[in-house]
Every structure is written in structure tokens, then in C-alpha cells.
């Protein structure tokens, strides 16, 4: 990843900080989007001083198409797009509000579409690029109380595989990672930590993501890679 221009959406979150650090450690130039100013401080604390000059942090609402297009247009080139933005809400389908359903689709699927669309607009003329999205184990093994989240992540998988087919014969690839529960502070707060020893560490998941975003993964396209840990 040395000297490669990498877009990381949601790079200040629990998983995002590990991915951002991993990209920097590999010599990449990450452009990291964020919404919460307080998360920027947490990212900078984890970045070695010698790497900070290669890190670009940009406040972007990735539900806004114009904002997504603008941040990508500002990049000198786009070698890889790693889309980490997402979130989940739980509840039985019979009681789940339509507003919450729409929020899950917007946060998980619509943002993936916008980032992929404008990344392709930049990558295809280059005839080079990597797109890595984040699905979920729930996309392939849906569970109760998570219908909206699982449906949205299944859409991310389908979107990514469709893009992989569209870009066949080019230097652009698209792949999706399917983690089980990621061991982040937010997930521990939401679900407790009784089973956390079996969850996937952000650092481990970052290794998989960075490989798929690297030049070494040129022959992998349309893969849905399970990263389930011991769950």
C-alpha cells in the first residue's frame, strides 16, 4: 500500500481506527472521513508522529451525495476505497418503526452505494482501484431482532458483487468482508462482554481489509470473505 491514496469512510470509529493505523503503517496516504469531532482526537492519539503528515481527516456526511463526490474529487487519485460506515438497531420486526428501517438502509446500504458510485467514477478512467465494503455475517445468516440490519448488509453484499461483475476485465476490483461481532467498545456496551473473547478484533479484521485493498489482491473480485473469529 506504499504511496497509495486510500479513502476510508468512517475511519474514526472502533474498526476505523485500526484500519487507518494499518494503512499508515503500510505507507499509505489515507483520507479519512468523520462526523464526530471528538473521534478525531482518538485517532490522532493512536497515530505515530512520523505518520501524521500522510493522514488527511475530512468532515463528511456520507449520506450526502454531493459531499461524497466532493471528497473523492479532491483526491489526486483513488487507489482504494474502504467503506466502513454503518450501524445497527435491534428490535422485533412487528414493532420496528419504518423510520428506523429507513435509517438502517440509509446508513448501511445507501452510503455504500454513494461511495462505490463515485469511487468507480474516479477509478475506471485510471483502470486501477480496489473497493472494499463491510457486510456482516447477518447478511448470509440473518437472525431475529436484526431484520433491517441484515437486509441492509445483504444489499451491500449484492451491490459489491454486482460491481465486481461490472468491472470484470478492468484493473478495478470489488470485494466485501463479512465479520461476525467486532470487539469494539460500542459493541461491548451494547451486548456486554461475556462472549467477547470469541469476537473478531479490529486489528485482525483490518489485516484482511488492507490485503483486499492492496495491489496483492488484484486477482480477487466479487469475494464475500467471512471473518467470524470463534463465534
Image: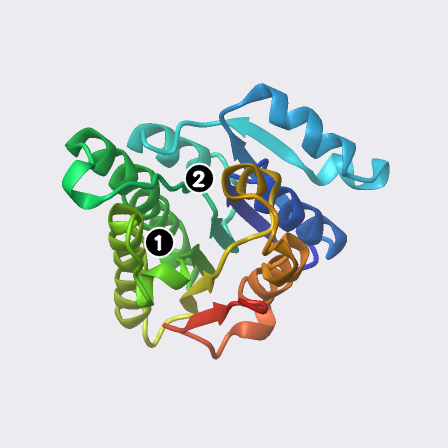
Color encoding of the figure: rainbow
Report whether residue 129 is seen.
no
Q: Is residue 44 left or right of residue 88?
A: right
Q: Is residue 176 left or right of residue 79?
A: left
Q: Earlier in the sequence, mark 2 or mark 1?
A: 2
Q: Mark 1, residues whose alpha carbon is within 10 Å: few (<14), some, or many (≥20)?
A: many
Per the image, label 1 sits on a secondary structure element best described as: helix
Report whether residue 202 is seen.
yes
Q: Which residue is at a point 37% across and 28% down the rendered structure image?
A: 67
Circle on res. 72? 2
Of all residues shown, which one is farthest toward the front?
A: 194
Residue 45 quadrant:
top right
Residue annotated with mark 1:
120
Q: Which residue is at a point 58% across and 67% down the rendered structure image?
A: 229
Task: Point out residue 171 in the picture as x, y percentages from the top left corner.
Answer: 43, 70
CA–CA distance in space, label 2 to label 1: 10 Å
Q: Mark 2, residues whose alpha carbon is within 10 Å: few (<14), some, or many (≥20)?
A: some
Q: Nearer the viewer, residue 231 or 81?
A: 231
Q: Which residue is at a point 66% across and 48% down the rendered structure image?
A: 18
Q: Nearer the viewer, residue 107 or 113?
A: 107
In the displayed structure, 87 sits above or below 154; it is above
Task: Point out residue 177 in the picture as x, y percentages from the top left corner.
Answer: 46, 63
Task: Point out residue 192 in the picture as x, y percentages from the top left corner.
Answer: 56, 43
Of all residues shown, which one is farthest toward the top?
A: 37
Amino acid at each position: 500500500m506504499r504511496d497509495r491514496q486510500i479513502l476510508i469512510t468512517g475511519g474514526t470509529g472502533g474498526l476505523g481506527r485500526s484500519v487507518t493505523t494499518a494503512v499508515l503503517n503500510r505507507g499509505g496516504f489515507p483520507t479519512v472521513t468523520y462526523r464526530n469531532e471528538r473521534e478525531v482526537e482518538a485517532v490522532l492519539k493512536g497515530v505515530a508522529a512520523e505518520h501524521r503528515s500522510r493522514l488527511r481527516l475530512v468532515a463528511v456526511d456520507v449520506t450526502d451525495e454531493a459531499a461524497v463526490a466532493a471528497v473523492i474529487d479532491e483526491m489526486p487519485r483513488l487507489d482504494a476505497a474502504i467503506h466502513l460506515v454503518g450501524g445497527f438497531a435491534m428490535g422485533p420486526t412487528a414493532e420496528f418503526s419504518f423510520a428506523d428501517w429507513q435509517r438502517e438502509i440509509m446508513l448501511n446500504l445507501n452510503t455504500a452505494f454513494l461511495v462505490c458510485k463515485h469511487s468507480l467514477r474516479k477509478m475506471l478512467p485510471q483502470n486501477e482501484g480496489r473497493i472494499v465494503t463491510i457486510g456482516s455475517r447477518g447478511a448470509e445468516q440473518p437472525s431475529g431482532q436484526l431484520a433491517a440490519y441484515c437486509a441492509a448488509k445483504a444489499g451491500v453484499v449484492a451491490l459489491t458483487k454486482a460491481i465486481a461483475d461490472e468491472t470484470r476485465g478492468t484493473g478495478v476490483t470489488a470485494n466485501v468482508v463479512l465479520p461476525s461481532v467486532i470487539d469494539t467498545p460500542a459493541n461491548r456496551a451494547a451486548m456486554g462482554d461475556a462472549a467477547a473473547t470469541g469476537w473478531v478484533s479490529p486489528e485482525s479484521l483490518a489485516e484482511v481489509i488492507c490485503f483486499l485493498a492492496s495491489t496483492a489482491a488484484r486477482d480477487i473480485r466479487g469475494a464475500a470473505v467471512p471473518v467470524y473469529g470463534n463465534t
